[in-house]
Amino acid sequence: MSARLFQTWLFARVSFIGWGDAYRRSAGKTHACVEGERTDAPLGRGRIRPVGMGTFKGGVHLPPLVPPIAKASKADDSSLVPIPSRFFVTSGRAINKTSELNAFDLALLKAGIGEQNLVSVSSILPNGIKQIERKPIPMGAVTHCVLARHAGGEGEVISAGIAYAFRADGRGGYVAEGHLHGTQKALKEFLRWRMEEIAHFRGVELLKINYRTEELSIPMDHYGVCIAACVFLR
């Protein structure tokens, strides 16, 4: 090895070791970062190097190429959409000669929710929610509801409705929606089966099951629609 090459190698070696000593002093001790946690166990032959750990060379621990993954902070309990604290149930039915959609619009108006922007949601009553009487809602308000709807033609008998009940343990409740070609009596039996199965799936007991249903016998040359809804309010 020539003198110039030896000097270059020696300078690089000393600089490398000096940098390693400074790194150890600043870090306090060599360690590997895995998922934001520290481990001081040396890497043995054949061991898998954890993600994020630096490399070892000449007894010196180099910094990781990727920063440690920070631990997830405790989840925030708040929801993106405020949890409703009140609800009311409502229903309506209507017939129309022009179209099924016009009959649906009229049924919504009769139920008191025809001037709102309705958003259908699934069927959970939150903890602490209270039932109130039907109340006016501002025109154009985005309104969340569990909506049952059924439409039919001339000569048909249709029904639509909801069932709802609170849990016996006081932790909220559930709503089931349903519809069929037939009477309210048959619909209520179907809704009761639904509610019993909802409770069975969750291993809970329900208090009294309540119903809100509509039945309509549609005359000739008409369209008909029945609706029922559980409307959530803040």
Image (spheres, rainbow, N blue to C red):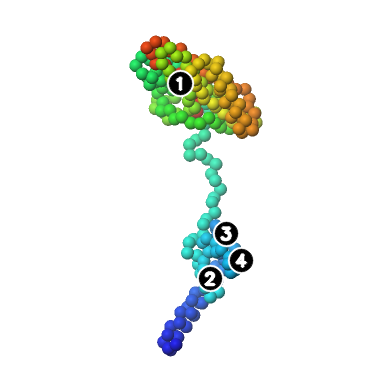
Tell me the residue that label 3 is attached to: 37
Q: CA distance from mark 3 to mark 4?
A: 12 Å
Which label's residue is closer to the chain start, 2 or 4?
4
- The nearer-to-camera label among 3 and 4 is 4
The 10 Å Cα crowd at callout 2, few under 14, some 14 to 19, many 20 or more, is few
Res. 41 mark = 4
Type of the residue with mark 1: His
Res. 118 mark = none
Q: CA distance from mark 2 to mark 4?
A: 13 Å
Tell me the residue that label 2 is attached to: 56
* Residue 90 x/y as whole percent: 49, 20
The answer to whether any part of residue 166 appears in the image is: no
Residue at position x 36%, y 18% from top?
A: 99
Residue at position x 60%, y 32% from top?
A: 201
Tell me the residue that label 1 is attached to: 150
Type of the residue with mark 2: Phe
The 10 Å Cα crowd at callout 4, few under 14, some 14 to 19, many 20 or more, is few
The reply to whether discs 2 and 1 touch (Cβ–Cβ < 8 Å) is no
